[in-house]
């Protein structure tokens, strides 16, 4: 059997965008040349994400969130409010859950960053919290889910998943506009017991 | 976001030297949870960020004689979950775990938390007049949406609420901050750190432009264990206070020997209610005495039709907090 090429929706969208961008050849070449020059606001940094080391040159304004998504192609981490109010961008830095939208990429240097792409087993076995979210139907649209799961893993590890009330309190930084909270609490209770 | 340079000094001395000698609105960056948010809104436009998170020696929680010493870079979550602080100063732990979300508590530092800016929506939106953001431009809140604005310590220039919880608990516990500037180190009571708006609402606090907080000192107190921080919000968690009370008590039987009361969410600064405290000394602490203290704490409020509901709410919050603290004596 011949493997058919597999594209994610995101890859197709990006490919489409690149084709549009390269149509006028000269400006595209000029852009590429400009990108290799260190501008005054640029910062060189080394990020360790999901066990891989990346050397990058980013604008000093780049948040960890934008760097994960736009530079490393890790689109699992979501941009919701971009102001620290919704929790969709939750990742682990140095083993702790943080908001990647309110952290400059430079501030994550020297610390291990873990995103939703880095939690399943190498053989593809889902993390127990991922499995629990499926078991309890703890999502509808799924946009907040990567942030919910990263937050939940930390919540259990911190020892703050002892009761439904405690889970609600310590998961309050992750909003779900579909209102899947009942399933989310049940999923975290299940995962905390495994 | 306005472009900026990002420097990472490794000592406090280096950080304040940069702060003192660099033009272009330099700002200290620690947890970034207030500063980056305001930079995205163009409310803050620093040309230099002095990232102090690589400085060592500011992350300790220690006991110096009778004093609890908390480094400026200690994270909120570390203090909220600290077993000794939970036992000896529940008011401090509760003020922290009832503030923000766990993600933000893992990022935000104790020093930065003290200096967080107001959540006034007109301050946060550059389209509106705001004397705190743009001195002399006016105040859109006084005749605008001011349901959450301050009732105490306001002026004709500004009614922005001080949004924090931690500083309110610290004021109740007579805590102070240690600061460092090119002129050396000094200690400032937290109760004197923040400024009421008066005619210069753009100046939030008494620190010099080249001065940084390096730690917080909380004196040991017999009132610590019988203390609480009660916070009332529009939703049960992860919201700023509509009203809050930090209360600490020591009792002789049913009579109050000493009392500390500070109010949050209702004033332009963390608000110590000393007359309310005095009214309780020597009295049996029952609902009547607690209500009288509440009335004294909120005497002198300036209200609007939108925010007047927070006066009775604030009194009820204080009465309940006093009863919780009494239950811990």
Image: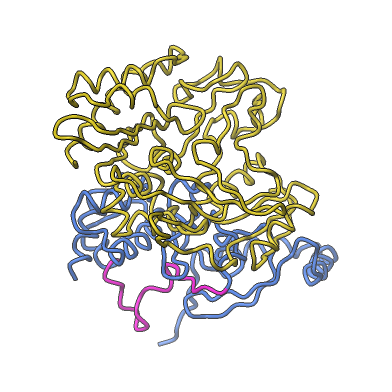
Tint applied to chain A in the drawing: blue
**Rendered location of residue B127, percent (x, y):** 66, 29
- B282 w.r.t. B27: above or below: above
Q: Confirm whether the magenta stretch covers residue A119.
A: yes
- In the displayed image of the protein, which residue is found farthest to the top? B305
- B300 w.r.t. A96: above or below: above
For the point 33% across and 27% down, the residue is B277
Horizontal side of residue B274 vs B204, given as left or right:
left
**Rendered location of residue B2, percent (x, y):** 72, 48
Horizontal side of residue A181 vs B308, given as left or right:
left
Tint applied to chain B in the drawing: yellow
Q: Is residue B120 visible?
A: yes
Q: Is residue B233 visible?
A: no
For the point 44% across and 44% down, the residue is B175
Horizontal side of residue A147 vs A106, given as left or right:
left
Horizontal side of residue B162 vs B181, given as left or right:
left
**Rendered location of residue A160, percent (x, y):** 27, 58
- Residue B15 location, quadrant: bottom right
For the point 61% across and 61% down, the residue is B52
- B241 w.r.t. B312: above or below: below
**Rendered location of residue B145, percent (x, y):** 50, 20
Q: Along the line of sight, which residue is nearer the eye, A144 or B271?
A: B271
Question: Which quarter of the image is occupied by the C terminus of chain B?
Answer: top left
Q: How many marks?
A: 0
Q: Confirm whether the magenta stretch covers residue A93.
A: no
Q: Along the line of sight, which residue is nearer the eye, A137 or A9?
A: A137
Q: Along the line of sight, which residue is nearer the eye, A137 or B281?
A: B281
- Residue A59 location, quadrant: bottom right
**Magenta region, residue range:** A110-129
- Residue A157 location, quadrant: bottom left
- B249 w.r.t. A166: above or below: above
Looking at the magenta stretch, what is its main secondary structure? Answer: loop
């Amino acid at each position: 059997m011949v493997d058919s090429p597999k594209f994610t929706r995101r890859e197709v969208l990006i490919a489409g965008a690149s084709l549009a961008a390269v149509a006028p050849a000269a400006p595209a070449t000029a852009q590429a040349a400009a990108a290799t020059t260190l501008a005054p606001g640029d910062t060189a940094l080394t990020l360790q994400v999901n066990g891989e080391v990346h050397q990058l040159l980013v604008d000093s304004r780049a948040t960890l969130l934008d760097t994960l998504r736009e530079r490393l192609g890790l689109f699992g981490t979501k941009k919701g409010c971009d102001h620290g109010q919704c929790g969709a961008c939750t990742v682990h830095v140095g083993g702790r859950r943080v908001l990647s939208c309110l952290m400059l990429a430079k501030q994550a240097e020297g610390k291990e960053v873990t995103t939703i792409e880095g939690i399943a087993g190498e053989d593809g076995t889902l993390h127990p919290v991922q499995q629990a979210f499926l078991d309890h139907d703890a999502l509808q649209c799924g946009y907040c889910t990567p942030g919910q799961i990263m937050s939940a893993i930390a919540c259990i590890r911190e020892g703050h998943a002892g009761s439904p009330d405690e889970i609600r309190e310590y998961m309050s930084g992750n909003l779900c506009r579909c209102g899947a909270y009942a399933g989310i609490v049940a999923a975290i209770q299940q995962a905390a017991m495994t | 976001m306005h472009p900026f340079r990002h420097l990472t000094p490794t000592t406090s001395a280096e950080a304040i030297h940069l702060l003192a000698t660099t033009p272009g609105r330099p700002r200290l960056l620690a947890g970034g949870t207030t500063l980056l948010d305001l930079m995205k809104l163009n409310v803050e436009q620093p040309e230099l960020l002095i990232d102090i998170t690589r400085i060592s020696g500011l992350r300790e929680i220690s006991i110096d004689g009778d004093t609890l010493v908390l480094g400026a870079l200690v994270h909120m979550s570390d203090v909220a979950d600290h077993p000794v602080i939970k036992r000896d100063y529940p008011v401090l732990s509760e003020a922290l775990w009832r503030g923000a979300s766990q993600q933000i508590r893992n990022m935000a530092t104790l020093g930065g938390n003290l200096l967080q800016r107001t959540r006034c929506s007109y301050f946060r939106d550059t389209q509106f007049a705001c004397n705190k953001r743009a001195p002399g431009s006016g105040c859109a809140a006084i005749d605008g949406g001011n349901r959450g604005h301050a009732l105490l310590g306001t002026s004709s220039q500004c009614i922005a609420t001080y949004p924090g919880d931690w500083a309110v608990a610290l004021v109740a516990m007579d805590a102070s901050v240690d600061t460092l500037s090119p002129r050396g180190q000094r200690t400032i009571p937290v109760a004197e750190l923040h400024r009421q708006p008066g005619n210069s609402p753009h100046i939030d606090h008494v620190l010099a432009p080249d001065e940084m907080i390096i730690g917080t000192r909380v004196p040991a107190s017999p009132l610590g264990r019988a203390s609480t921080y009660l916070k009332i919000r529009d939703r049960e968690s992860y919201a700023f206070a509509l009203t809050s009370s930090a209360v600490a008590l020591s009792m002789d039987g049913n009579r109050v020997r000493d009392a500390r009361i500070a109010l949050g969410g209702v004033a332009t600064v963390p608000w110590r209610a000393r007359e309310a405290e005095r009214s309780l000394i020597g009295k049996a602490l029952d609902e009547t005495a607690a209500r009288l203290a509440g009335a004294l704490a909120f005497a002198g409020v300036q209200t609007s039709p939108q925010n007047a509901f927070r006066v009775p709410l604030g009194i009820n919050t204080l009465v309940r907090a006093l009863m919780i603290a009494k239950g811990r004596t």
